[in-house]
Amino acid sequence: MKVRKAVIPAAGLGTRFLPATKAMAKEMLPIVDKPTIQFIVEEALKSGIEDILIVTGKAKRSIEDHFDANLELETNLKEKHKDELLKLVEETTDINLHFVRQKHPLGLGHAVLQAKAFVGNEPFVVMLGDDLMEDDVPLTKQLMLDYENTHASTIAVMEVPEEETHKYGIINPGEEVAKGLYNVKNFVEKPKPGEAPSNLAIIGRYLLTPEIFSVLEEQEPGAGGEIQLTDAIDTLNKTQRVFAHDFKGTRYDVGDKFGFMKTSIEYGLKHPEVQENLKEYIIQLGQKLATEQASTSKEEEIELS
Ligand code: UTP
C-alpha cells in the first residue's frame, strides 16, 4: 500500500523555550523568516505526501492561522504591489492540512494516537518539528522508498556521540539487511549512561504501520512519565519486523536553544537577503572575540608570573 499520509505532532509544552512558548507553539519559532513547522510541511510535500494532519495543543491557533488565508494582509500586499511577499504568503495557504487537538500533553506516543481516525488502516509517517533534515532526497522520501521493499515500519536513526545517547531513543541494531538498513532487535528510550545498546539514535522521522495504534492504546507511561512512542515501537517490534534507516544527511536539532541558534545562523548564511551581511558580521565578531580572548590570556599570564 502506498504511503500517503503524514502526522506532525506539535502539541508539546516546549518548556526549553519558555517564556517564548507560553502562548506560542515551539513549532512556530522561525528559522530566519520561516516557522520550523513550515519546513516540515515542505519536506512532506516534496516526498509526495498527499494529506497532512497536525496535532495541536494549547497554542493551536497560531499554527492554524499560519496555514490559513489572511485576506487583510493579502489585500494590503496586492494594493502595494508587493508581489514577492504576496507569493510567500499565498504559498502557505494552498496546502491540504487537517488539525486534531491533543487535550493534554501526555507524551509523543499519545499525540500520535490522536491521529488514529485520520490514518485509518494505512502506513503513514510521523514527522517531528524539532528536527530539520537536509539531504539530496528528503529523509521522509528515503523512508517511503525503504517501505516499498520492506512493507514494514522503518524508523530514521543517526549516529550520535556516546555521551549523548541518554537524551534519545536508541536502537539495538540487529542484522544490517541492506546498506544502512537494520532489522532492529529492540528499542530503548533514553538509556542510562553506559547502558545504550549502540550510538544509533532515533531522529524525528518515522514510517509506521497502522498496527501501532492498538499498541499505543495499551501503552503505559514510560521515561519522564510520558506515553513514549519509542516504547510502543519496541512492543510493535515483537509482533512484526521494524527496521531502522541510518540517515547520512544533515540534521539540525532545533529543539533546544543552542541547536536553534546554530540552525538560524547556518540558514541565515544561505538566505539570499541576509547572507552577505551575516557573513561579514560573523567574521568581524570572530576577530573581536579572538582579540578579547588573547588579551584575557595575556592578563592571566602576567598575573601568574
Ligand atoms: P519534545 O519532548 O521535544 O517537545 O517532543 P516538548 O515536550 O514540547 O519540548 P520540551 O522538552 O518541553 O522543551 C517532541 C515532539 O513531540 C510533540 C512536540 O510538540 C514535539 O514536536 N509532542 C510532545 C506532542 O505533540 N505532545 C506531547 O504530549 C509531547
Image (tube, rainbow, N blue to C red):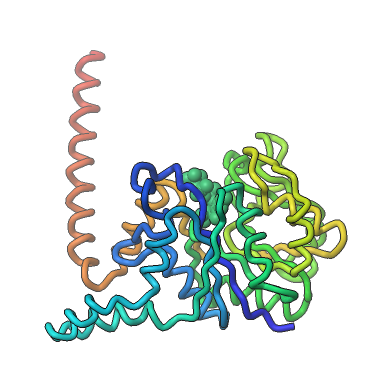
x then y, percent, for residue 288: 17, 43
Above or below residue 52? Residue 26 is above
Above or below residue 304? Residue 87 is below
x then y, percent, for residue 232: 74, 54
| The C terminus sits in image quarter | top left
* Res 303 quadrant in image: top left
User: As drawn, is 114 to the left or to the right of 183?
Assistant: left
* Res 37 quadrant in image: bottom left
**Residue occupying the point 18% across, 39% down:** 291
x then y, percent, for residue 2: 70, 83
Above or below residue 34? Residue 222 is above
**Residue occupying the point 49% across, 55% down:** 57
**Residue occupying the point 46% across, 53% down:** 58
User: As drawn, is 23 to the left or to the right of 291?
Assistant: right
x then y, percent, for residue 302: 20, 18
User: As drawn, is 238 to the left or to the right of 22?
Assistant: right
Total numbered labels: 0
**Residue occupying the point 82% across, 61% down:** 175
Above or below residue 215? Residue 8 is below
